[in-house]
Image: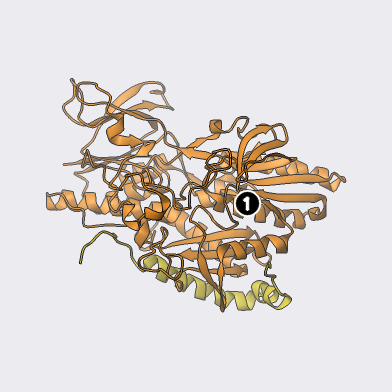
Amino acid sequence: MTRRISKRKRFVMMNPIIQFFKFIYLSLKILVVVAGGHGGTREVK
Amino acid sequence: MSRIVVLGAGISGHVAATHLRRKLSKEHTVTVVSPNSNYQWVPSNIWVGIGRMEPKDIIFPLEPLYKKKGIEFKQAKVVTFHPEGDTEIDKPFVKAEYVAGEAKGTTEKVTYDYLINATGPKLAFEMTEGLKPATNKAYSVCTYSHATEAWHALDQLIQQMKQGKKAKILIGTGHAKSTCQGAAFEYILNVEQELNRHGVRDMAELTWIANEPQLGDFGMDGMLLSYGSNIMKSSELVEMVFEDRGIKWIIGAGVNKIEDGIAHYETLDGEFHTESYDFAMLIPAFSGHGFKAYDKNDQDITEKLFKGFMIVDADYTPRPYEEWSVQDWPETYQNPSYANIFAPGIAFAPPHAISKPRVSKNGTPISPAPPRTGMPSGITAKLVADNIIDTIKKKKPSLHHKGSMGNMGAACIASSGYGITKGSGISITTFPIVPDFNKYPDTYGRKLGKTFGEIGLAGHWLKLALHHAFLYKAKMRPFWWLIPE
């Protein structure tokens, strides 16, 4: 069954104050994923 | 003294050229060969396609920047590769044909010590009969000029809807093997929001058509992700958004022919259908450029360099889906036959798809090709540049820098509506891009904490912030290198 976006969730999604903090949180979280580094997959330990 | 030639000035080529120039002394030459005079920040084409940005907001001319920074620029397209030189020149070179200026139409043998092929994909519209930008009411947003055409047509349709016309809009993939579903996904959500803004949403039937076997596949076999306190499949996330926006969908569909306002397609169950539309935006198939390569004696050696796209250090042994491994994917993007040739970004030939290959009951392959977005393009270009820099500085071959898409994260901030207070974005990160089923066997090959989705206004701000940050970086403004790829 398809999930729905509830009224409360929609309020949270579009509230500028809540979203400002979400913006900072997301920026940091994405930075962690991006700056988390990258490398090969074939090294034999 | 070394000469590094970079073919292409898109995200990958520009990243490679700028890092090479910054880290190598001026005794070494960095040359960019590109038919395009402008750099374009491709991810923002979506906003040009809905009239919320102008092309000038997402492009800038390359030549003045390169001149200022000491990068040689040739506005030319590469014609042939000669990695051993020829009977006249005892040095590897590419033959390039100038496309602008006084030299237009003339060719030059551009010699190199190291070659970075960052030519990206060819937009293969011709692989779908009748699919051509701004023809048959079908458009593209793959370039800023295509996106401009798309907006003009959409704007006209919006004006007609304001006069009472009911319209059908079709957005998605225009070939059974297309990739880049993410761009089409962004576009359909932005179009939906713009229709609302213009007060004509109820006049339009909006339909998603894609070669994905499930919504949210994105050419990556879908993903299991964290969404708030929930864990859900990307298919559920996209279905939730489409339901919320009133968007219909057709999936497992290989579009094979476009006529004026009609898309013909075959589905995985082997049936043939048509879908009519008043406006369509369909992503074409991507292909290699069909380059030819020759050895010193002018013998054709194309198969040593190309397999559609350029051959690199991937494992190209044909295997069934069940035997695909993350180790098949390249790490250094070096051509195995010629150690001084590299192909980062979209220019390298992937070992295979990421999504499970599927064929229709009629035997037609209908499944997405692997996506390679801006972020991995930038990362792979930088690591190739770093390996060349190390090799030059240490005076011995160095492949210390590695970056497999099976050990690399990616962030996809999909715009789902433009506006500082009314905008929205779907932020999705995934790690790794190519699923590693040995490392993460219980979560579809991906690390759950680093694979997450978020929907909301913050996503739009983030995409807008990245737009400005990456253009700042591309223009090589002060401390540009501190901004990660």
x then y, percent, for residue A40: 28, 59
Tell me if residue B80 can be seen.
yes
In the picture, measured across the screen, residue B336 lies left or right of residue B281, that is left
Picture coordinates of residue B435, whole percent (x, y)? 41, 61
Above or below for B365 versus B354: above
Side of B71 where B142 appears, left or right: right
Residue B53 visible at all: no
Dividing the picture into quarters, in which one does residue B168 lie? Answer: top right
Q: Which residue is mark 1?
A: B187
Instruction: Tell me what hue chain B is rendered in.
Output: orange
Residue B405 percent coordinates (x, y):
37, 56
Q: What residue is drawn where x is 65% and y is 59%? A: B417
The image shows residue A17 at horizontal and vertical percentages of: 63, 78
* Total labels drawn: 1
Quadrant occupied by the C terminus of chain B: bottom left
**In which image quadrant can residue B214 be found?**
bottom right
Q: Which residue is drawn at the image coordinates 52% and 64% (left, top)? A: B428
- Front position in the image: B257 or B130: B257
Q: Residue furthest right?
A: B164
The chain assigned the colour yellow in the figure is A
Q: Is residue B27 above or below residue B257?
A: below
B53 relative position to B339: left or right: right
The figure's colour scheme reads: by chain
Q: Can you say whether B334 is above or below B383 in the image?
A: above
Asked if B88 appears above or below B284 in the picture, the reply is above
Neighbour tally class for label 1: few under 14, some 14-19, many 20 plus, Cα within 10 Å: many
Amino acid beneath label 1: Tyr
Camera-nearest residue between B1 and B267: B267
Q: Residue at x 36, y 63 (%)?
A: B482
Q: Residue at x 56, y 75 (%)?
A: A22
